[in-house]
Amino acid sequence: MKKIIITAIALVFILSNFSFTADETEKKVIKSAQDNLQNSLLKIPAGHEKDFGFKNREEFALCTVGSPYRVITFTKDFYEGEMVANKKYIVLQNEWRIPVMVNGQNRILLTINANSDNYNVVDMGGAALAKELQQRNNAGNHCYILRVYPLACDFLVVAEAPAFTDVQCIPMTSAIKAIPSLTSNSKSFYSLSEAIQIIKNELKNQSKN
């Protein structure tokens, strides 16, 4: 009994420490986005504001940043080997998408990469994805973007804790277009294991064609 209690305390400490680290990292990501926001917006060519989700350049002065979405991907084993039960295929990337907002409305996403302890804005785009993410309205949860590069599509992954508990995988429009089986299935979200299997099946189908 004593051993069980000690193990439980250790698990709580590990998850709490992970949460603390995640919170500190998120603060750094947000700070980088805030510090580089205006310089990033000024790189938008004059006359192309609408291509980046803005009505005009006057909106730049109203911009703020929202909560970041950390990017997750699959391991090399996922793409190259057969599925193995209970094997971990998810990889946390040092990359985030953070919404740029005008009056609380998502307009575009900044991409931030981390190298050691340096957080840098490396790209800006995804106006359609920015709006779609806001429609999901998952405030208070831990949100990630699962990027499936071979299919050029994304899933929104929503977890109640940073340790990926009670995960919901929500296919974005890009995923629905890339994976036909999602169209025939009326589910609005999937468990992580379901999503992984669906993606794997689609990759196998495409390799046969």
Image (cartoon, grey):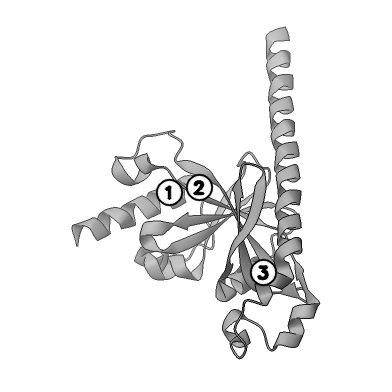
Asked if residue 90 shows in the view, the reply is yes
- Mark 3 falls on what kind of element? helix
Residue 124: x, y in percent? 59, 69
Residue on which disc 3 sits: 134
Residue placed most toward the observer, 28 or 74: 28
- Disc 3 residue type? Gln
Q: In this view, does 147 lie above or below 118?
A: below
Q: Which residue is drawn at 71% across and 20% down?
A: 10
Residue on which disc 1 sits: 196
Q: Are marks 1 and 2 in contact (CB under 8 Å)?
A: yes
- Disc 2 residue type? Leu
Asked if residue 1 shows in the view, the reply is no
- The Cα atoms of the two marked residues, 1 and 2, are separated by 6 Å
Residue 92: x, y in percent? 55, 44
- Mark 1 falls on what kind of element? helix
Residue 145: x, y in percent? 56, 56
Disc sitting over residue 192 in the figure: 2
Q: Is residue 193 above or below residue 8?
A: below
Q: Are marks 3 and 2 in contact (CB under 8 Å)?
A: no
Residue placed most toward the observer, 43 or 75: 43
Task: Classify residue 162 by image quadrant.
Answer: top right
